[in-house]
Amino acid sequence: MEASSVASDAAAVKAREAVEDLVAEGLAVTVRAVRERAGVRTAAAAQAARAHAEDLAASDPVPDVPGPVAGRFAAVWRQAVLLARAEHAEAAAGWARRLEELTLERDEAEADLRGAEAEVEALTGERDKALAELDGCRAELDGLAGRAQDAARQAADAQARAAAADARAETLGEVLARLAPPGPPG
């Protein structure tokens, strides 16, 4: 025999002994309890616990349900099914109402959204029109400012020419006064 086969046989023996001890002590036979009691791997403990459960099932089969109990159980079961169907129908109706409410809310929200989008579009158009008018006004203002500067330059030039003409006229007046023959004494 190989060493691993001997080891697994020893683990199986330990696991079976742990099952017997647990049963003798009135404790539940679980894989965990067998593994902890025997100090074996989970696979060996599971095999021993499974074998114990199969032995119990074979030695103490569950009897069929007696006729009167089966009849009463069938009546209780029928009532439970009817009650469950009624509760399910009520719940389904409630969810259908809730779905209808939510659908209406969604439709209203979508209508509000469409209205808001139309309003945004209208306001955007008004804004674009106002911006275009503003640009036109700025251009007109720039044109008027340019013409005002031109007019101011022309006025300044005209004032300078007028001042120069006044100065020449005065100078000419003085020259003429000097050149003019003296008048009769008077």
Image: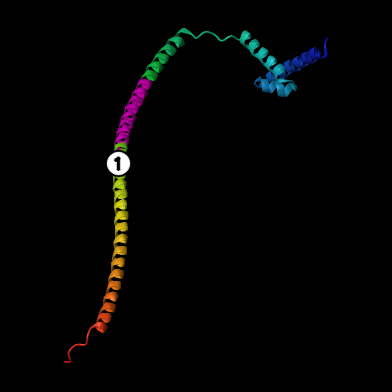
Task: State left or right for residue 49 relative to residue 14.
Answer: left
Quadrant housing residue 90: top left
Residue 78 appears in the figure: yes
Q: Which contiguous range is marked in magenta?
A: 86-115
Residue 93 in picture, x, y percent from top left:
33, 23
Q: Report the quarter where the C terminus lies.
A: bottom left
Residue furthest front in the image: 181
Q: Report the predominant secondary structure element of the magenta stretch.
A: helix
Task: State left or right for residue 12 relative to residue 154.
Answer: right
Residue drawn where x is 30% and y is 72% of the image: 164
Quadrant housing residue 31: top right
Residue 50 in picture, x, y percent from top left:
66, 14
Label 1 packing within 10 angstroms: few (<14), some (14-19), many (20+):
few
Residue furthest bottom in the image: 186
Residue drawn where x is 40% and y is 16% of the image: 81
Q: Which residue is mark 1?
A: 125
**Above or below, comparing residue 101 to residue 61 in the picture:** below
